[in-house]
Image (cartoon, rainbow, N blue to C red):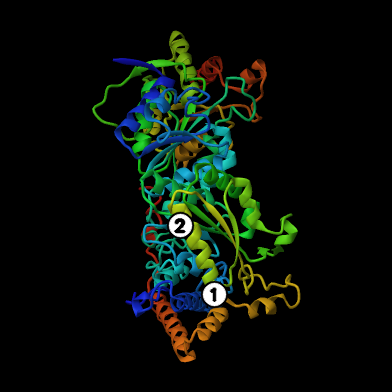
Amino acid sequence: MTDHDSARMSSTGGTEGDETALLFTMCVIRDFEIEVQKLFAQGLVRATTHLYQGQEAVATGACSVLRPEDTMTCTYRGHGAVLAMGVSISRAFGELLGRAGGLCGGKGGSMHLTDTKSGAMGSNAIVGAHLPIANGLAFAARYRGSSAVSLCFFGDGATNIGAFHESLNLAGIWRLPVVFVCENNLYGEYSPVRSTTPIGRLADRAASYGMPGVQVDGNDVIAVREATANAVARARDGAGPTMIEAMTYRIVGHSRSDPGAYRPPGELAQWTERDPIAHSVRRLQAVGHSITTLDSIRADAARRVKDASQIARQWPAPGSDSLHRQVYV
Amino acid sequence: MTELTYRQAINSALDAELAADKDVFLLGEDIGAGGGVFKVTDGLHAKYGSGRVFDTPISEQAIVGCALGAAMQGLRPVAEIMFSDFTAVCFDQIANQVAKYRYMTDGQVAVPLTIRMATGAGGGFGSQHSQSAEQWLLNVPGIKIVVPSTPSDAYWMLRSAIRDPNPVLYFEHKLLYGRKGEIAQLDQVPPLGTTGVGRNGRDLTILASQLMLFYALEAAKTLDDEGISAEVLDAKVLRPLDVSGIRDSVARTHRLLIVQEAPALGSWGSSVVAELVNGQHPPYPHQIKMLTGADTPIPYAAELEAAYLPSAARIVAASRSLVRPDA
């Protein structure tokens, strides 16, 4: 690990919440995912990975409003959210590489990145399964009289699984301090959301569970940040949960085996125009940041990712003695 | 000495742990003011209030997931799943989440939660409320599975389960709730333990749990009259499975009869057999027989359910055929 082994910019002088810091985090996530693609192609990352390119503004904006005592749970497309919590980038790489120094000692892999010290309480490989758990984290906070909030990311596909409905119902009836963030990237795996879901606005589902349903531009990091800040403040005040639907798009396939052939012509190009990083850069330039400053932020992010990857690749595999550890306490 | 019913013993254990540790709380369907469908939590809501003992919607995934998230933060939830058959609707939360969370995160969290549920046949509840669902979860490392039989074990094993840093599935046999027994007076809560001894004997070992344990004890009395001395073991902890006590007993009696409500395939009894014979060379030197529930769903009608289940008479017959095959 280096001193700057995090997607959070603060150690290099930025202020959290300042859009330059958010840009930095988004760039780290983007570069991390591109590096993962390379590592996968080299056979160093096993099985599959679910990449986050195009959706960086959602995790970055939402996680940026959390306090150290808050918790975050996410999906198997979770590299971005976990990095946005400020975990060690090298240890995240280490986990994907199956190294002893990985966040989970090589036992979790791409779909289970977890770093509880950073509040990243788990990435889950079962669609919707972490929503009940997010409730439990929120319940524990309230039981102990803490004002901590539980932030929970999931995809559009999860809104059709039973655990989603059980969880929003329970959170609604108990007014739990949870913020449910649905990342609607228009596809549940390979299937367009309109072919699997009979309503157009997923945020409308919140009404059934007595909570506000807010739709937001998920490719605008400031818009996501503001919507999440409102929902988090509401949860902290004891006013209960909120569901946010962040409209976004993954500019890569569902997983490593998916070339995305099901996309209609022109859709990808249209969303690439609305790339969250480019969007942020344009806005920062408009308020007077020089392109040189912004380029140096991007270069700094790229350097951190490259350094972290190099460090992690040198770590050893877990010893076979670790196989039987942590099954039971 | 205190005599309690199995139901009272469980209630007293919950009471004791709620009193001992503010991090303990109870959640489940109708367990609050209603006291639970089997009245196991009766009075606890009145004593500890809605902040510690509370009702949930009929949402088993939400119940178990909420307990898991809370346990990850160091609380000690005790969730009730009304019938063990309903683990099927929260199987993901138990098998993929609760059981694996510690391992997948390389020990970043512990999951000190207890899930209580009513299990077992014999009460005419039909196919979806009578199964011994503990079998379904045997193949899942990371959880503990306990099946207490006596009121004393029900009391101490529940207190132990709640204090255990691991997730414990605690199965309560619904036909035992009214059965009375002395509660052992102990200075401290013991660990969950392994196999218990129901009675000692020389000629064969009968291994059973819960309702079948009492049938086995009844059968052993009949066998006494026939001059057959049966040792009866109580399989209290099914996972982790420690067969050392069983192995020692069978080394003396040379005959093992396993009695269980569930069908044989994929069951705990089959797992005991596998543990005993695995790696034995030359072939296993003792006789083994399994007396199990029929390989059918559990039927409703009294006559059909009786035909499904092992009985004391069938245990006597099976024991006799093991000890005196030529008679």
Which residue was labeled with disc 1? A40
Q: Quadrant of the N terminus of chain B?
A: top left
Depicted B325 relative to depicted A181: above or below: above
Q: Is residue A143 above or below residue A311?
A: above
* Mark 1 vs mark 2: in front: 2
Q: Amino acid at mark 1?
A: Phe
Q: Label 1 neighbourhood size at 10 Å, few (<14), some (14-19), many (20+)?
A: some
Residue A6 placement (x, y as % from top left): 39, 73
Location of residue B162 (image quadrant): top left
Label 2: how many residues lie within 10 Å, few (<14), some (14-19) or many (20+)? Answer: some
Residue A228 in view: yes
Give left or right: position of B126 versus B4: right
**Amino acid type of the residue that numbered disc 2 sits on in the rendered structure:** Ala
* Coordinates of residue B152 in the picture (x, y in percent): 36, 22
* Residue that extends furthest to the left in the rendered view of this protein: B187
Query: Quadrant of residue A8 in the image?
Result: bottom left
Q: Chain of mark 2?
A: A
In the picture of the structure, the residue carrying the numbered disc 2 is A233
